[in-house]
Image (tube, rainbow, N blue to C red):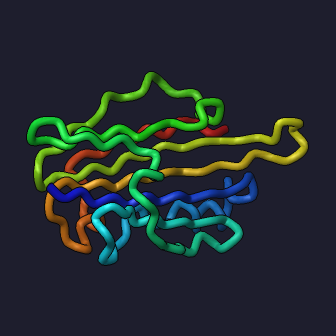
Amino acid sequence: MEVTVQWIRTSWTKQSRGGEAAARRNAAPVGFRVPHMSPSAAHVVRMRERDGFDPYDGQEDLRKVDVQLRKDDDRLRVLPRVQPLFALPPRPRRPPAVRLAAGQWVRWQLNYRFSSATGVRGWSYWLDTFNIAYGPAGADVFLSPPTVLVDERGPVR
C-alpha cells in the first residue's frame, strides 16, 4: 500500500521568540499540498527565520527522513526518531508508535533546542512536523485535520 510522507522543518533563533517574528513563525503552515513524487521520496518543506519563514520545498529519499515506518499486518506503524537526544527540551516519556489503518494519517510534532558548545552563540530551535498518510492520498490530504495528532513538543524556555 502507498505511504505519503511530508516532513516540515521550521527553524529559528531567540530573535523569533516574541513579537512580530514569533507571530510569523506561529502562523507558518503545518501542512502543504503534496506534489507528484516518486513512491520512495518524501515531500520536504523548510521554513527558516532568515527567510522570513517562507516555505521552500523539495524531495528527499524516504530513507533519510527521521521516522520509522513499518508495515505491521494491515496497518502502518509510525514512530519518529529523536535525534540528537541532547537537544530535546524536557518532556514526559515518549508516546508509543501510532498504527494507521488504510485511509488514515498522522501529524506528529517534535521540537528541539540547541546552544553552542561554548555558549558563545545564543539558542537556536527547530520544529519537525511529520505528516504521514497510509493508503492512496490526494494532493490536499495534509490540508485537513489529521486522523491522529501527536504533539510531542516540550518547553523551549
Residue 82 higher or lower than 123, as above or below: above
Task: Give the quadrant of the C terminus.
Answer: top right
- Residue at 89% of width from left, 36% of height from top? 118
Q: Position of residue 104 (x, y in %)?
A: 16, 52
Q: Position of residue 57 (x, y in %)?
A: 49, 73
- Residue at 24% of width from left, 45% of height from top? 148
Give left or right: position of 59 versus 2: right
Q: Position of residue 9 (x, y in %)?
A: 53, 58
Give left or right: position of 103 versus 128: left
Q: Position of residue 10 (x, y in %)?
A: 56, 59
- Residue at 57% of width from left, 75% of height from top? 54
Report the front residue among 86 and 49. Answer: 86
Give left or right: position of 91 versus 157: left
Q: Quadrant of residue 98?
A: top left
Report the front residue among 145 and 87. Answer: 87
Q: How many marks?
A: 0
- Residue at 40% of width from left, 66% of height from top? 43
Task: Give the quadrant of the N terminus.
Answer: bottom left
Q: Quadrant of residue 30?
A: bottom left
Residue 122 higher or lower than 41, as above or below: above
